[in-house]
Image (tube, rainbow, N blue to C red):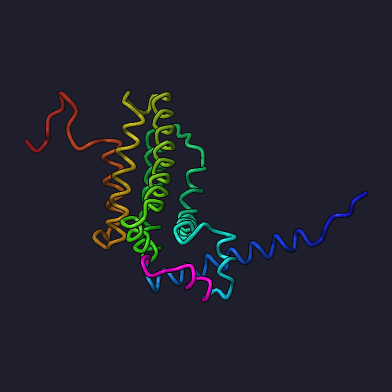
Amino acid sequence: MEKNNPRRPRRYLRSRITRKLILDTALDVFLSEGYAKTTIAKISDQAKVGYGTVYSHFKGKDDILNKVVDNVLVDFYNLLEVPFSPKTLEEARNAYYELVLTSFRLGEQHRPIMKVYQEALGQSESIASHWYGIKEQFIESSARSFKYAQDKGLAKEFDVQLGAKAYILLVDRFIWEVVNEREQDLEKIAILIIDMLFYGFFQSPGKKNKKN
């Protein structure tokens, strides 16, 4: 009977440690140098690992930056894993409010690296493609939630895919407003977006404006 090779777990652990070291070091380099001036050579030198070692774990600096941002968004990804199963409109509204507010808080909390990522979005097709893919995940998740709400009689009939796209693009725009410090009151923005989503700004047909 073949014995388990004790070296394999140790090699795996060393690989994970090295990968984390590269990501942590890359974060420091990106923050100090910005996207354009960051190179694999600088990352490997500061991490004190071989140039080839970096490439054995990542495809290049774009791949590294995408992984860094994925780590930043892990709390939001975890929220998306929570099943959307509200029984009332108020429960649905609260769930969406938490999602929107969390996205803004993450943008605020990780503002420095998100500014680097924003710089990269304008220079790298692979970075832009990765961010597009992230938004597509959120759009699909929202479309499923909208469909659930329709099936439960909590939402009117509309094109859930188009509605989800409009919703996510609006949230995405405000995330960058928060990152760039053009919006400070996160709760106010989140409430406004959720009120737009759930109630709208205009009176329903047949209702009179109380101010008139």
Closest to the observer, 122 or 104:
122
Q: Position of residue 18 (x, y in %)?
A: 61, 66
- Residue found at the far left of this picture: 212
Q: Position of residue 119 (x, y in %)?
A: 32, 61
- Kindly identify the residue that appears in the image at 44 percent across and 68 percent down: 39
- Kindly identify the residue that appears in the image at 51 percent across and 48 percent down: 78
Q: Is residue 143 visible?
A: yes
The number of callouts visible is 0
Q: Quadrant of residue 161?
A: top left
Closest to the observer, 35 or 115:
35
**Could you tell me what secondary structure mostly forms the magenta stretch?**
helix
Q: In the image, is residue 105 part of the stretch drawn in magenta?
A: no
**Against 156, is 86 above or below?**
below
Q: Quadrant of residue 8?
A: bottom right
Closest to the observer, 5 or 101:
5
- Residue found at the far right of this picture: 1
Closest to the observer, 160 or 41:
41
Residue 157 placement, left or right of 6: left
Bounds of the magenta segment: 35-45
Instruction: Identify the image quadrant of the C terminus.
Output: top left
Q: Position of residue 41 (x, y in %)?
A: 49, 71
Q: Is residue 102 visible?
A: no
**Against 183, is 150 above or below?**
above
Q: Quadrant of residue 13?
A: bottom right
**Against 99, is 56 above or below?**
below
- Kindly identify the residue that appears in the image at 40 percent across and 33 percent down: 143
Residue 207 placement, left or right of 75: left
